[in-house]
Amino acid sequence: MATLTVQGVPLGEGRPKVVVPLTARGPADLVAAAEHLAGLDRGPDLVEWRADHFDRLDDVAAVVAAARSIGAVLGGTPLLFTIRTAAEGGATEIDGDHYLTVNSAVVEAGAAHLLDVELRTAEPGRRDLVSAAHARGVAVVVSSHDFEGTPDRATLLDRLRRMRDLGADLPKIAVMPRSPADLLNLLDVTWTFRQESERPLVTMAMGATGVVSRLAGGVFGSACTFAFVGAASAPGQVPLAELHQVLDVVHGDDRTDHAEHHGAERA
Ligand SMILES: O=C1C[C@@](O)(C(=O)O)C[C@@H](O)[C@@H]1O
């Protein structure tokens, strides 16, 4: 089972990597939030900028500048750039062309290490964006979110395979479980895909019923889990410090590794 290594952080190997989203609206608050994360004794392994919350998303240069500022503060910690559209539970009704323009500009500027491309993005833009990211050495997360329910196992597996076939380095699926059976299906599909695929994946079930997937999804093959500092960016997310403690119980304490990943690159 292969690993995707981004900025020295191995995804799909060992303990799942913790991602904290930044959801501040303005550049100064974003930088302050990034500084806070960078200063934590036990910070995240990756940081996601949820640029759909940014109050200047219409200004491509402002987005690129903010991504650069966040990246500079984070040092070596990998930065995932995400515009989560309203249709997928995000904070903005962005038009399709502007979505492609902003994402392409961030990729061309080398301002992020990973790029989230929503599966629902229309062709040919979707394929062009994936190719542009790969040409710049940016890893691609192809994502899909179901806020209403959980598709059946066959549909989930088919979705993950389509993401892989599109060139996703890290397919990602979030669902809303309506019962423990939905949660079991998601975990089952996660492990099935993990075994058949040459790349890691990320899955999570949202809401209260899904919390266990954020705590123990790594056992079933999910490479990352999202936690919050300040404000959650999705239902059911767990505070960062508590998530680290639970992962210590489930996977063992990684403090030495963690210090090595980030300490080495910042030094
Ligand atoms: O796709 C995801 C996962 C997520 O929706 C979650 O459920 O934790 C949080 C988002 O910020 C991120 O882009």
Image (cartoon, rainbow, N blue to C red):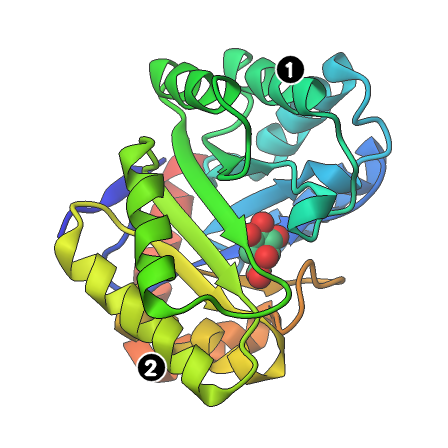
Query: Within 10 angstroms of label 1, few (less than 14), some, or many (20 or more) residues?
Result: some
Instruction: Where is residue 72? Give x, y as percent.
Output: 60, 28
Residue type, label 1: Thr
What is the spatial separation of the Cα atoms under label 2 and label 1, in whole angstroms?
Answer: 41 Å
Instruction: Where is residue 102? Give x, y as percent.
Output: 66, 20
Q: Secondary structure at mark 2?
A: helix
Tell me, for residue 101, which label it has, or none.
1
Instruction: Where is residue 4? Give x, y as percent.
Output: 26, 42
| Residue shown at 70% from the left, 36% from the top | 51
Where is 244 relative to 266, above or below?
A: below
Residue 83: quarter of image: top right
Viewer-closest of 134 and 62:
134
Where is 105 relative to 27, above or below?
A: above
Tell me, for residue 14, which label it has, or none.
none
Residues at marks 2 and 1 touching, judged by CB atoms closer than 8 Å? no
Upstream in the sequence, badge 2 or badge 1?
1
Q: Would you name the residue on which mark 2 appears?
A: 250
Q: Secondary structure at mark 1?
A: helix
Viewer-closest of 50 and 228:
50
Left or right relative to 93: residue 133: left
Q: Quadrant of the C terminus?
A: top left
Residue 18 visible to an observer of this rendering: yes
Left or right relative to 2: residue 15: right
Please, which residue is most extreme toward the bottom here? 180
| Residue shown at 33% from the left, 81% from the top | 250
Where is 78 relative to 131, above or below?
A: below
